[in-house]
Image: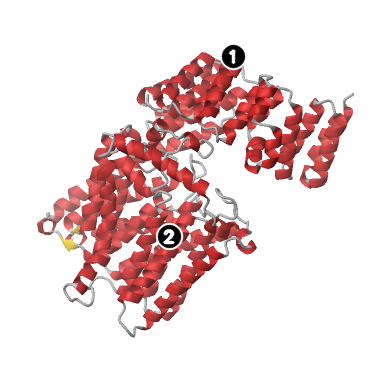
Amino acid sequence: MKDFLKWVIYGSVFAVPFVLLIVSSSMFFPFITGKNFAFRILVEVGFAAWVLLAIYDRDFRPKWSWITAAVASLTIVMFAADLFGEYPLKSFWSNYERMEGWITLAHFFMYFLMLGSVLKTEQLWNRFLNTALVAAVIMSLYAFGQMAGAVDVSQGGAWRVDGRLGNSSYLGVYMLFHMFIAGWLFVRTKSTNLRYVYGALFFAFGFVLLRTGTRGATLGFMGGSVLAFAYLTLMLPKGASIKKWAAGGLAAIVLAAGSLWVMRDQSFVKENVVLSRLTNITLSEGSIRFAVWKVALQGVKERPWLGWGQENFSYVFNKYYEPTLYAAEPWYDRTHNIFMDWLIAGGILGLFAYLGILATALWYVHVKPMWGRFVRGVREDRHFSVAEQSLILGLLAAYTFHNLFVFDNLASWIFYGVILALIHSRVAEPIAAFQKFSIRQDTWERILVPFGLLASVVVAYMINTPGILAAQDIIDGYRAQTTAKSLETFGKALDRGSFAEQEIVEQMAQVGVQRIATSGMSAAEKDELVRKTSAALRDLAMHKPGDARLHMITGVFYRAAGEFDLALEELDKAKQLSPRKQALYVEEGLVFLNKGEKEAALESYRTAYELDTRSDLNRVRLAAVLAFLEDDAGSAEILDMSDLEADRTLRDVFTTDEMSLQLYHEAKRFDIVEYIFEKRREATPTDTVVRTNLAALYYEMGDKEKAIAVLREAIKDIPSFKSEGERLIKGLEAEK
């Protein structure tokens, strides 16, 4: 029985690095859901087996370190913060988009405990770390495939690879951790051949990191490397051969970084997308971050000690919304700063608990050894070599710097836990009370183990299965061929009783908007769609009355359904919760336009504009509304066409905004619509939709010959468009 439990434990522990390779196309958020559910199930089953084994076998019982206390403290503090936060259900379970919250934190703690207790020897640690490298090699090969154009990039374009993680920033920090692992094994191994292998992997992972274009991780690595080499240079004894290499590495990194910065305006840097991204951090990007952090601090002032609970920053963001953020992203759910995130989620206590984890790691690896060396005269630390100390220092510094501008994800959580467990396994001491406990073997084998394993499997199934099935239902609801089937599938998802009620309802509403917009829906089908979706939205609002975004989504749905008064009621509720969010006034303006209340619409758009007159988007839309209302003079006063040639950013906003295009088209301002389509053709010369829209415009203007000329030019420029273009030309020529 012991051997069986060991196999279960080791199987789950060693399988975890591979879950990050999972992409579940059949689930909602395919790069997130499959990975997280697999991680949770592996940890739950493995943890149950470990507890059962530890009850009988003292060798597997947990040991004490201040790192364990710090991780436990964060878990406990955040339980209280989430329980008394704004929306506990989401704080505990999160959503499909993130899948973090307290449940993930608890699994992180369990995984840490398992690793620290099960990997008891250097040999086991080496096997585990080598296993992690195998998974990282597969991830890197996928990234190289993206660089070669053989594999699509999910986010960021071909120049910013994202591997199997679906986000370049996630891949960046993933590679950062595996560069450390390769470096750690390089230092630990005595085999020259293996050193060549680990060295090659280190540079391969570094190249992938660079190609992610993730500035936080890349700059963090450079800064961490400087610290690591400086530490080696200072702490190694005189005459040590590696001391010269450390000093040389320090000089090389400083020289390379300095040279790159000095040459940031040179063509070879500016024309390389990755290098230009690293060397050109604009003030506008910084201002966005600062604006978000300013909003966050308002929330901290309101709830300073235990915060708002995890996954609840959106409430703070909406309540204290800064209008200058409209063009960036209107619905932030993260501050893009890990320390600010913990301050919002858990207040001062939560932030201190999180920092406590970093502090205890540094204490064991650096502070305590230095105290022993310089105060007590102990020359060598018995737990870590100087090389190991430098590697850990560099990694923690790089990881911390990275998190100043982004936030954690499953990949960083897993490998931060690995590093903490590695340190813990070196310094932990047995807990006397745990060591004294004993149990009879027959009781353990006949009662505890069978029932414990059965219970763990049942619990894992009951906890995870509803969420897995609901994630599949959402995709099926999207893909459903009929409205009835779509409603049935979303209803099934809601009936599963998962944690994803909000996402299910929101997607149900968005699909409903799309179906209403399409032709061919009968009155009975529309009535059924509106009735069921409205009921779902109302039920969700009862649980989340303070969610401005939910009220806006509901308002959008009612507008699409033609229920304009109900739409205005929902938008009014949203404005009460987020009075400075321009998106709400823009949507309100659309409702008034649909109702035919032109003056009210103008007032809504003017309010959106006046909340931030520097916003190009609000300026463009107000001008379009004035043109639609036949106030050409007022439109020109807000936005003269000559302004577009002088300001490229403004021109890009003007030519890409679909709402403004629609308003100009309905106002019969064909000259402006033509201008927009011509600029779109210049920007995307291979976009057949732009060409056909331009041809359709000329046809609407009564210039059939010009429409045909546009299509013929499209055939010449885009060979794949030949059959479709010739069909359209034939149709135009056939008309009298």
Please name the residue shown 41% across and 35% down the image.
Answer: 317
Horizontal and vertical percent position of residue 181: 39, 66
In the picture shown, does residue 397 fall above or below 707?
below
- Decide if residue 365 is on the left or right side of residue 154: left
- Decide if residue 69 is on the left or right side of residue 686: left
The amino acid beneath tag 2 is Gly
Residue 4 in view of the camera: no
- Decide if residue 64 is on the left or right side of residue 470: left
- Decide if residue 427 is on the left or right side of residue 606: left
- Element at badge 2? helix
In the picture shown, does residue 488 fall above or below 195?
above
Question: Mark number for residue 597?
Answer: 1
Please name the residue shown 42% across and 46% down the image.
Answer: 336
Q: Which residue is mark 2?
A: 220
Q: How is the image coloured?
A: secondary structure
- Element at badge 1? loop
Residue 592 in view of the camera: yes
Horizontal and vertical percent position of residue 728: 81, 33
Instruction: Tell me where residue 245 sits by quadrant.
Output: bottom left
Please state, as top left, top right, bottom left or bottom right, where the C terminus lies in the image: top right
Horizontal and vertical percent position of residue 384: 27, 71
**Earlier sequence position, callout 1 versus callout 2:** 2
Instruction: Tell me where residue 465 sits by quadrant.
Output: top left
Please name the residue shown 37% across and 43% down the image.
Answer: 100
The amino acid beneath tag 1 is Glu
In the picture shown, does residue 592 fall above or below 80?
above
Q: Residues within 10 Å of mark 1 (few under 14, many from 20)?
A: few
Question: Mark number for residue 443?
Answer: none
Please state, as top left, top right, bottom left or bottom right, where the N terminus lies in the image: bottom left
Judging depth in this view, the residue of 696 and 522 nearest the camera is 696
- Say whether marks 1 and 2 touch (CB < 8 Å): no
Horizontal and vertical percent position of residue 57: 18, 59
